[in-house]
């Protein structure tokens, strides 16, 4: 929603209000006690409701740009490498 506000301003489209609903589907298999837990995301669905006096084609342009400019959405659609490090009491912990 931040990008909708940002790009709406840049494209001179008035956004009087907006609301987004996100539904995530996921699954968890394995056991924490057996050190075999594995979570995975199965999918996500979003519904964006926008209140604007501007023409639909101009609002659609804002939404297209906002979706392409959303770092989280892009990371989910095109996975990126992630480097994870953990420290314990200041020392590196191998997990």
Image (tube, grey):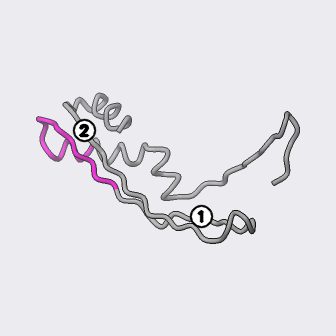
Q: Whole-percent x and y of residue 6?
A: 35, 31
Q: Whole-percent x and y of residue 77?
A: 48, 58
Of the numbered discs 1 and 2, the one sitting upstream in the chain is 2
Query: Quarter of the image holding residue 35?
Result: bottom right
Check residue 89 in the rendering and tell me which mark sits there, or answer none.
none
Q: Whole-percent x and y of residue 88?
A: 83, 40
Say whether residue 53 is magenta: yes
Quadrant in the picture for the C terminus: bottom right
Q: Residue furthest front?
A: 33
Disc 2 target residue: 18
Quadrant in the picture for the N terminus: top left
- Front residue of 2/34: it is 34
Name the residue: 17% across, 47% down: 57
Q: Residue furthest right?
A: 91
Name the residue: 36% across, 52% down: 22
- Element type at mark 1: strand
* Relative to 40, 1 lies left or right: left
Disc 1 target residue: 39
Residue extent of the magenta highlight: 46-61
* Relative to 17, 89 lies left or right: right
């Amino acid at each position: 929603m931040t990008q909708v506000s940002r790009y709406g301003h840049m494209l001179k489209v008035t956004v009087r209000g907006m609301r987004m609903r996100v539904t995530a589907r996921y699954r968890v298999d394995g056991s924490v006690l057996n050190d075999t837990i594995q979570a995975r995301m199965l999918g996500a669905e979003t519904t964006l409701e926008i209140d604007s006096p501007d023409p639909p084609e101009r609002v659609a342009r804002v939404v297209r740009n906002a979706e392409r400019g959303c770092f989280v959405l892009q990371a989910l659609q095109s996975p990126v490498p992630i480097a994870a490090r953990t420290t314990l009491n200041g020392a590196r912990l191998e997990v």
